[in-house]
Image (cartoon, rainbow, N blue to C red):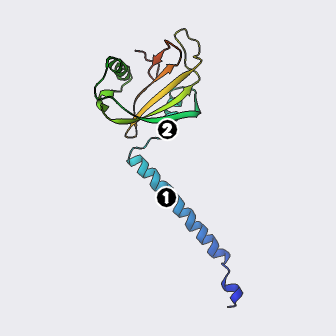
Amino acid sequence: MSARSRGRISLKKAVLVMAAVVVVIVLIKCTVGYISAAFGTFSQQDAAEFLRELGWDIKTDTAYFAEIVIPAEFSDVYERYNRLQQKQGYDLSLYKGEKVTKYTFEVLNFSEYDGSIAESAEAHVLVSGGSVIGGDLCSMSLGGLMTGFKGESF
């Protein structure tokens, strides 16, 4: 074998190496997906899809999230907010004192009391352990409307 041919890789070996790399990448992606599901991760994209499935037209380019703490003791306002959550099948009292993730999106098709589309409205999705635990939709105008995900009001 000449010195020149020793430095070359055959086409067959190159294809095998590339195939092995693809297999490793696929295995890593599958493993990460499995781990994410097992440990209850929930992404901003998951929150967006949750809202879209309920019929909300949202903007994702201005979306953001924050870690918040559900108060250990509820004020009157939080008690009222939790009643809204209970109407839609959630109960924030189960998460008192716990840190949760709050995803916020601009909503483009939220109606005010009079049926007109709100000039500015937001959706909030509260998540813990990979599951939605509550949230709301509200217009940002002074004295605006707040509802549950399907239009349930206080």
Residue 3 placement (x, y as % from top left): 69, 89
Instruction: State the SS at label 1.
Output: helix
Q: Which mark is residue 70?
A: none
Residue at x 35% of width, y 27% of height: 90
Disc 2, SS = helix
Mark 2, residue position:
46
Please tell me which residue lies in front, 33 or 66: 66
Give the Cα separation between the discs numbered 2 and 1. 21 Å
Q: Which residue is mark 1?
A: 28
Viewer-proximal residue among 134 and 15: 134
Q: Amino acid at mark 1?
A: Ile
The quarter of the image holding the C terminus is top left
The furthest residue to the bottom: 1
Amino acid residing under circle 2 = Asp
Query: Which of marks 1 and 2 precedes in the sequence?
Result: 1
Q: Position of residue 120 (x, y in %)?
A: 57, 20
In the image, is 153 to the left or to the right of 114? left
Q: Residues within 10 Å of mark 2 (few under 14, many from 20)?
A: some
Q: Quadrant of residue 58?
A: top right
Position of 143 relative to 73 (above/below)? above
